[in-house]
Image (spheres, grey):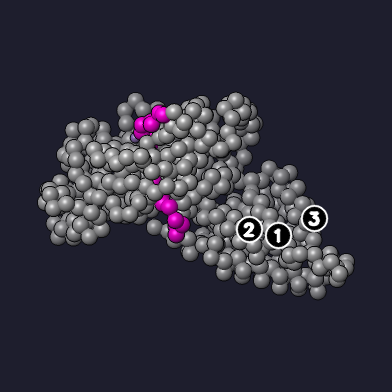
Amino acid sequence: MSKLSNYNVWFVTGSQHLYGDEILKNVDDHSKIVAKALNDSSDVPVNVVYKSVVTTPDQITKVCQDANVDENCIGLVLWMHTFSPAKMWIRGLDLLKKPVVHFHTQFNAEIPWSEIDMDFMNENQSAHGGREFGFMASRLRKNRKVIVGHWKEEKAQKALGNWTRVAAGWHVLQRTKVARIGDNMREVAVTEGDKVEAQIRFGFSVNGFGVGDVTKYIDQIQSADIDALVKEYADTYEITKETLNNPNLKDAAQIELGMRAFLEEGGFGAYTDTFENLYGFKQLPGIASQRLMADGYGFGAEGDWKTAALLHAAKVMDEGLEGGTSFMEDYTYDFRKGRSRVLGSHMLEICPSIASGKARCEIHPLGIGGKDDPARLVFNVDEGPAINVSLIDMGTRFRLLVNEVDTVTPDQDLPNLPVARVLWDPKPDLDIAASSWIHAGGAHHTVFSKAITTDFIEDFADMAGIELVVIDGDTRLRDFKDSLKWNEVYYHLFQNKM
Ligand code: MN
């Protein structure tokens, strides 16, 4: 799997010749200092590579073209230290295919009241240099993030760092291969969609494989490797003697090893399966999918390739952050006076990256699918803020839908529930959240994350040039329904991409 430390963002400073060599030398020095501070910041997980001060249309065009073809460059950080007349940026911005963040900062922090003169003003003029650049980016309908703040501030560095995480997820998604093992769960609508349009829009490709393409790998697994993995299960999770001696555990380990080999050899970043298409599998992959997700693979159940791809991108973004990210399903409600909540889970496949403490490895019957009792990891999830994200194909466009939620501890144990589960209190409340979600056509499957926030998804939607609708603490149902109608018109008129 990819590592964030392998990726670079290029730090490029806009200026012009008018200032003369002395000021341009200062601009260059300042740019190096700012780029180094961002590179050194623990909030910025990728490398910030200082590129150049650009002062002519040709230089700007060149750096944009170079960025397009550089394999490790995931985006550009643009800073208008001084005034950079923006007609110079037209060609470069028009050609640029990588994500852009406009870092609206200034070298100096506070105004030196008693000393400030015109030289100082000319050297610290991001306030109007950034506006000139901003006009052109808007005039070109160029999606980008704007971060305002002094470069030493944690808030600005964090915003930049989070944007680089999203840019890395976006970068990886351009090359992601999604293996669709079996097809869709029959007759299900929301997990379907236009795979060609998805590849045009997001970069990832989705291709189908027969279940036999995977069982071929499973059948070749050696018993010594199976025993070693069963031992790893025993060392990593809470497990009873009875489970450890259940032959189904060995089958589960064999399935995991086979699926892993299939995914590695094919260079896949995400996959789907479905319980309706398991010919040759002894049991539905449960613990296998859970552990593959924990290692960064995107997963979607019942053929859900959209959620699988999105989960893989989110896994790139959340590297090293607290909280974890998982495939999720809105499963059942806890209707009550006061605060109604949602219990999220799936038949088996919830990622242990969100687990509270050590997961339990258990084997229980599965009501559907007609296969052997599958092994799975069972756990609860700690309290805290989280998001649910759904990627929907509306026919004429893709829509990203976010609901901000608070994960809460269940009032009582759930001793008879043999799956990982998480209880959440959706914002602003279940009534408005579920009404809004349903009006927006949101799926039952989501990417659930305690590690990344709505801001990440907003940046991602901008990079993809797709619709984003958010259900948060301020959502009012009537306004929300109106925004869906307005977006219908907007996205009919504009199909912009980065
Ligand atoms: Mn499902």
- Kindly indicate whether the residue at mark 2 contacts the one at mark 1 (C-beta within 8 angstroms): yes
Pinpoint residue 236: horizontal percent, then vertical percent: 25, 58
Relative placement, left or right, of 275 versus 165 is: left
Which of the numbered marks, if any, corresponds to residue 281? none
| First reached walking from the N terminus: tag 1 or tag 3 | 1
Please tell me in which quadrant of the rendered image residue 143 appears. top right
Residue at mark 3: C-beta within 8 A of ligand 1: no
State the residue position of label 2. Answer: 156
Q: Quadrant of the N terminus?
A: bottom left
Q: Nearer the viewer, residue 278 or 375?
A: 375
Indicate which disc residue 128 carries: 3
The residue most toward the right is 118
On the picture, is 207 further left or further right than 48? left
Report the residue at 41% width, 51% height from top: 324
Closer to the N terminus: mark 3 or mark 2?
Answer: 3
222 on left or right of 391: left
Q: Amino acid at mark 1?
A: Thr
- Please state which amino acid type lies under the numbered disc 3: His
Residue displayed at 50% across by 40% down? 404
- Disc 3 to disc 2, C-alpha distance: 19 Å
Q: SS for tag 3?
A: helix
What type is the residue that disc 2 sits on?
Ala
For marks 1 and 3, give the CA distance. Answer: 11 Å
Please report the residue visible at 61 percent of the width from the left and 70 percent of the height from the top. Answer: 36
Answer whether residue 441 is visible to the viewer in this image: no
Q: CA distance from mark 1 to mark 2?
A: 9 Å
What residue span does the magenta drawing correspond to? Answer: 319-336
